[in-house]
Amino acid sequence: MSNPILDYLEKHLDDAIADLRDLCSIPSVAAKGEHIDEAAQKVMHLLESVGLETSIHQTSGSPVVTGEIDIGANKTLLFYNHYDVQPAEPFDLWETPPFEMNRRDGRLYGRGVADNKGDLITRVWALKAFQETNTNLPVNIKFLAEGEEEIGSPHLNEFVKENRDFLRADGGIWEFGSTDIDGNQEMWLGLKGLLYVQLEIERLAMDAHSSYACMLPSAVYRLVWALNSLRNEDNQILIDGFYDDVKPLSKAEQKAIENINMHEKDVREFYDIPEFLDGMRGIELKKAFYNAPTCNIAGIDSGWQGSGAKTVLPAKALVKIDFRLVESMRPEDILRKLRNHLDRKGFTDIRIAWNHGYPAAKTPIGHPFVDIVRKATEQAFGHGPVVHPTSPGSGPLYLFKGLVPMVSVGCGDFESRVHSPNESILVDNFLKASQRIVAVIQQMEQETF
């Protein structure tokens, strides 16, 4: 039987793509702070065009755009998106200009098409399809779009503190999602937390000739020795109490991951490694992927980094470290334990120059809204999704905890090259992602929860 709402989306697909092209033409790179207000205004106008009452909320950083349709329904659906993107460099690796979206071979290419402007447009167009077919929305709608997700959402909490009631909803759709290498849609129910720190040490008033290494202290070696104390060769993190708050996966989560295909052979070949850490495979590897905290050196800077030789004894050294945190771990607790660890090991001269972090959060796998999104995905894509208890990545989901059960789905796929040159999405996924949102809205009306 024909569905006029879905038919409308299919008939007007080119118009939706045109909206995405316009949004992607705005180089709203959060790391550079460029064109942010322009993108926020564009999102506001898009939301207004489908009948939402909008507001722009100023923060100490980028503005938060909200929109709402309150029809007095019993249920409310919330969307979380972001209008900022990653830098497009290196430009020479793009086959077409990153901010001039290009359609070829069934795909749309451009910075932000997968992360996250494509998903933002699919959600706007799902609402537009209700509007243009004169179909009454059966649920209230709330829409939130921020402009700093790609730099860790440092100011979103300012909005949340003042507008907690706005985030209350019966279900929420988070920003991302994709089709895996087997063609299965993926649903993500959570995100790991994060603690990002920069450690610095200065041992000399200035760089010295390297011949003085026989008599002067080395900032680099001092930092290396400190780093060596954080993690052993068995990949165990040695900070006292680091694992104290780690909880095992629930029985339902363990059951869910049993049949997830990690494509171990493909991943090893892609990264050209003979095996994973400690020879992990099977269920052990899955448990690590979904529920293991990490201590990762993201970058080290000291001394001469240019081409050729320069014999120098560096005065300063710094390292950037990120810790991925799982449920119940708190970034402020890990930061305190890191400081205590360095002090106990005698590295009181190493300072934590700055830090940023937030806890993990996830929606219980048995929540009724999870099943609603699962059914909607099956309806739109023709098959059920792979349900992941959480993502190994991080994001500001914790700010929504206790206010709305969030599920993350989207229009990307395993070839989308998120954060890389030639970012892209399938046109077919773009259409079906909108149709899934329609199905979610209709399922919410039918289900009791």
Image (cartoon, rainbow, N blue to C red):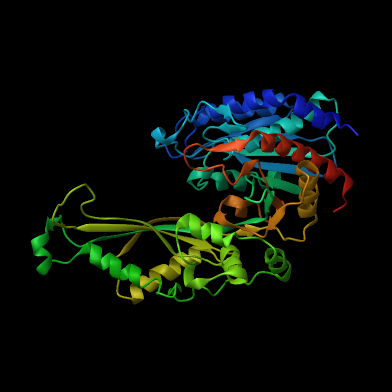
Whether residue 67 is visible to the viewer of this picture, yes or no, is no
The reply to whether residue 413 is in sight is yes
What is the quadrant of residue 142 in the picture?
top right
Residue located 49% across and 43% down the image: 419
Of 78 and 150, nearer the camera is 150
Quadrant hosting residue 76: top right
Q: Position of residue 167 (x, y in %)?
A: 69, 46
Could you tell me residue 146's position as x and y percent?
Answer: 57, 39
Residue located 45% across and 76% down the image: 240
User: Which quadrant of the rendered structure holds the N terminus?
Assistant: top right
Q: Nearer the viewer, residue 6 or 143?
A: 6
| Up-down relation of residue 196 to residue 133 (above or below) | below
Of the pair 377 and 350, the residue shown nearer to us: 377
| Left or right: 170 as drawn, with respect to 108 | right
Q: Quadrant of residue 115?
A: top right
Q: Residue at x 20, y 62 (%)?
A: 203
* Rendered residue at 83%/45% (across/down): 444
- Camera-nearest residue between 340 and 312: 312
